[in-house]
Image (spheres, rainbow, N blue to C red):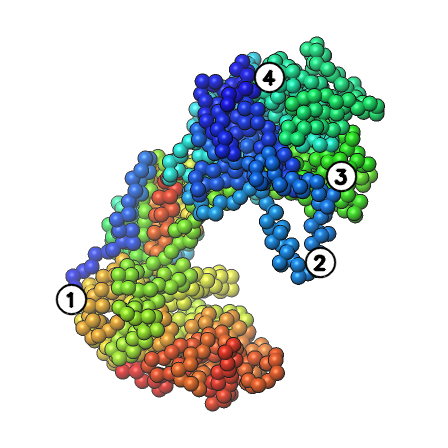
Amino acid sequence: MPQTFRIASVGRLDNADPVRFTFDGKSFEGLHGDTLASALLANGVHLVGRSFKYHRPRGMVSAGAEEPNALVGVHRDAARRAPNVRATVQEIHEGLDAVSQNRWPSLSFDVGALNDLASPFFSAGFYYKTFMWPKAAWERVYEPFIRRAAGLGEAPDRPDPDCYANRFAHCDVLVIGGGAAGLSAALAAADAGARVILADEQAETGGALRYETGAMIDGIPGWDWAQAVTAELVARDNVQLLTRTTGFGYYAQNMVGLVERLTDHLVSPATDQPRERLWQVRAKRVVLATGAIERHMVFPDNDRPGIMLASAARSYLNHFGVAVGRNVAVYTAEDSAWQAAIDLKRAGVSIAAIVDCRPDPQGPHVEEARRLGIECLTGHAVTGTAGRLRISSIKVRPASGGAERSIACDALITSSGWTPAVHLFSQSRGKLVFDAETQCFLPGNSVQDLTSVGACAGTVDLSETVAEALKAGHEAAGGAARKLPKLSADSTERWSGGMLGAGEGAGAESTAKAFVDFQNDVTAKDIRQAVREGMRSIEHVKRFTTTGMATDQGKTSNMHGLAIAAEMLGKPIPEVGLTTFRAPYTPVTFGALVGHGKGRLFEPVRRTPMHDWAEAHGAVFEDVGQWKRAWFFPQAGEDMHAAVARECRTVRQSAGIFDATTLGKIEVVGPDAARFMELMYTNPWQKLGIGRCRYGVMLREDGFIYDDGVVGRLAEDRFHVTTTTGGAPRVLNHMEDYLQTEFPDLKVYLTSTSEQWAVIAVQGPKSRDIIAPLVEGIDLSDEAMPHMSVREGMICGVPTRLFRMSFTGERGFEINVPADYGRAVWEAVWAEGEKHGACAYGTETMHVLRAEKGFIIVGQETDGTVTPHDAGLSWAIGRKKTDFVGMRGLARPDLVAPGRKQLVGLRTRDPKTVLEEGAQIVADSQAPIPVPMLGHVTSSYWSENCGHSIALALVAGGHERMGETLYVPMPDGVIAVEVTSTVFFDEKGERTNG
Amino acid sequence: MADAIARASALEGRFLNDEGITLVRAEPATRLSLRAPKTAVKSLSKALGLDLPQRPKTSTAKDGRAALWLGPDEWLVIDENEADLVGACASVSAFHSAVDVSHRNTAILVSGPRAEAVLNAGCPQDLSLDAFPVGACSRTVFGKTEIILWRTEKDAFRVECWRSFSDYVFMLLKAAARDR
């Protein structure tokens, strides 16, 4: 199909550069540089979608980012199916595949359009009123119905295959908007030597100069000037010029979010090329040059395909060379639409009539229109339209009343004036001020370092715009010492006049559909109804009617809605208020916000130096925080239960080797190290001998257990502290916090050494035999190196801090070696271990073995409400100590009251029954519901070494209940348990020296 | 008894050379986390043969040894010749803390005309030469991890991070390098 609405003599696209694309499966031709909207219009296609609620046929309203109607799906492949793409923004490329939305079975025949006939039932507040009762219907009827009906377009059902980039940037001056104002500001700032970033949302800079044929800057036509300045800026080292880049959010301290679209306009982007790039720009000063957005006229049936904004028609004509119709009518309340009619007429398009609701508009454009022989109906209104899938005529009558007359047309362009785009200014927390004369909200006082220039600041005259933008750019760059640059600018364009609210025929008495918000199908009548039903604040009107709540955020509609509400309330507009402008200015993909942070980069995955060895030896891993830890090492034919049982047996019979690298480690150094340790832990430290270790318990101020770990004293002034794996960062923060705020006089420094050391635990009766051949310079005899001691020496030729300690109850060692040696030392230990029948074991076996000994795990036996006394660790509190963090907390009445939950062991009556962790414990299984609960199971395992199940539990008054029978009610029956000591194996603790 | 073991880097075999950007793992080095009040700075500087920098974001370097300012009383000392830094400080009697972190950190060398942009994919600091000149250093963030960033030349940075985070840091640098 030829581009029958393309006019070869106008526009800037190259007629020799065709591009083929499809819309709803039908093939079309456009030109390189077209948007989907301009290309469809070139082919005479206005109908591109169905409206959200009433399924009314809709066409392009605008030529830019504010588009409420022309939302389409763009499909690149099965996974790349973007819904709700604005056809006015999407550039076409060879093979572009676009589809209409919200219609079935087809765009021209849509069953959902029945909603339009049923529209009396779908008035404002419909959802709130209809889906009230019965309550039970919500889940089964209403919600599924609403969910099916809700939303436009179809979300892709596959993972997004594209990648997205992120960039932090800094600059002296950030300019948002690349029209006459933005370019002038950037030019002046760059001239003054500032680092400048200029962002413009379109493929090319130029803004309104794209269609304003009457603008001259620096002696040449505005558009040509814009392109020349752009080329000049691009060539400068101190300027970064970003096109296809939207400033979408303005945050604290002049942080502005930009999203740059990199590949959506390309035929076949490289697979590893990011689709979009998020810029997080920190600017010393921001210049907002975001322009203004034209409003449509509000009158009955103002939403038919073919009805669009006057400025859009001018863009399509003057830039894209496309006539939006052959016989175009104009309905306006301001001057710039007249110029659109003149441009169209001069390009050979017939103008059906210019209807202006003002009684007597004056000016050169009016004279010129009359001179061109256009019928000018001033003091008239359009009171209706006809045409099913495209406008075919308008009804016109004098504003003062009188006979209605029908005028045939195939397009209607409208304008009720311009709304300054103050979105980013408002997001910056600047206050908006209503200007009664122009009926606009304009930027008032700024609270951040920013300036608004040009149309977004209410300046409509081109020469004033350029002058104030040059000044803003110059000053933002700190160029005060230099001479302010000047540029001549002159324009025949006029933006005066305008109206807010509903026009003739859509007044309070009217039941017609005069749309305010096209995307959410909100009419003037809906807004009036909201006020009648008691909504007084515009925030309530908005939520009741959903006006301005669609993805376009009411860019074309909010001021109309506000004016209608104000009129109904009999209040001036500023008293009714303005809804909040929220980021993003236009929709931003999740991909852009996520950036690189997906897949393997979603979260760092931490692996120990021995990870690959464990993997090669069949380890199954579990996540512990960000760490991957070997969970168990199944051998051929073993399930988890069998593997853990074997590992548990082997450790106690021979030995096991365990990767304990992930434990947190902190080196506490300084002459006051012992004093500091006394304050941070419940235990006494002053008298701990050099080379000895102690199990330490750390409390919070409130007296509850915060962390624990074995601490070795390496020197008078140096401790090697270990923490739980998950506790490492917070324990260091906790210590640093107290050191800096409570005990700043102590001469102590803290250094994290968690990752300096790889830690290989060798546990079991053969542990000493295994490591002995590898260790140099350390006497491993019990006399020289008893349980709970630490020595520095060599192992496998590398330095080690060798701890003799045990989390299993067996004789045990923990070999600390510098991390890069970890794997090699592990392999050497493993080779020795194999000679003794040792096994590698994982975290599950570690858990079972420590539970057999009643050793707690912080975070499993404790939950932030457990004191050392509750956990049976009273012995770890230094009795003679006068101070430590948590000491006063421990004395609180509730913490010493009887009946607290205390840690006990549980044995099931049937030794084979393994309790469920978290299961509740009661005293009387027959008691009526709700049964008073005494506590819960914190740890529970099958113990191969004991030959029966074991469990730890927190039970009210547990220490006084030894030997009592309690009950664990489960869905399939009640389990009887006996309260026991927490130590199930080697109660006398002889094996640490065995 | 086994022979002395060679250090095994967490980034063994990792390398990227793309248009305008090169990522290489740094050679093994010794490192010291040095904490000291002002009173010990002079004697520590003498012991290390290097003036400990006193101004934020600055470093000093000499003969393969460098001291990076991390805080008013904190430095990271790196010796590319693997000299014994703990030993060097042992003679200083003034109160200080010298902790060996040679293996805690690992380092990636990021170089090329695109180095600055690639780092700015995850580092929010202003890395322009005016704000972050050659020799500048800072403990900062890169994506979701902490790094110490040190500009060694106009187009060359050293990124120090904890050993287990180096895989993430390298992968993020690599992903950022795709953004041309």
Residue A532: horizontal and vertical position, in percent? 80, 45
For image coordinates 15% across by 66% down, the residue present is B1
Per the rendering, the mark at residue A193 is: none
Residue denoted by label 1: B1
The quarter in which the C terminus of chain A is drawn is bottom left
Residue A498: horizontal and vertical position, in percent? 73, 26
For image coordinates 61% across by 13% down, the residue present is A348
Residue A108: name its quadrant: top right
Q: Nearer the viewer, residue A331 or A810?
A: A331
Secondary structure beneath dot 4 equals loop
In the displayed image of the protein, which residue is found farthest to the top? Answer: A371
Q: Are marks 2 and 4 on the same chain?
A: yes
Residue A327: horizontal and vertical position, in percent? 65, 19
First-in-chain label (3 vs 4):
4
First-in-chain label (2 vs 4):
2
Q: What chain is tagged by disc 4?
A: A
Q: Are marks 4 and 1 in contact (CB under 8 Å)?
A: no
Pointer 3 local density, CA inside 10 Å: few below 14, some 14–19, many at least 20: many
Secondary structure beneath dot 1 equals loop
Per the rendering, the mark at residue A213 is: 4
Distance (Cα) linking label 3 and label 1: 92 Å
**A859 displayed left or right of A177:** left
Residue denoted by label 2: A133
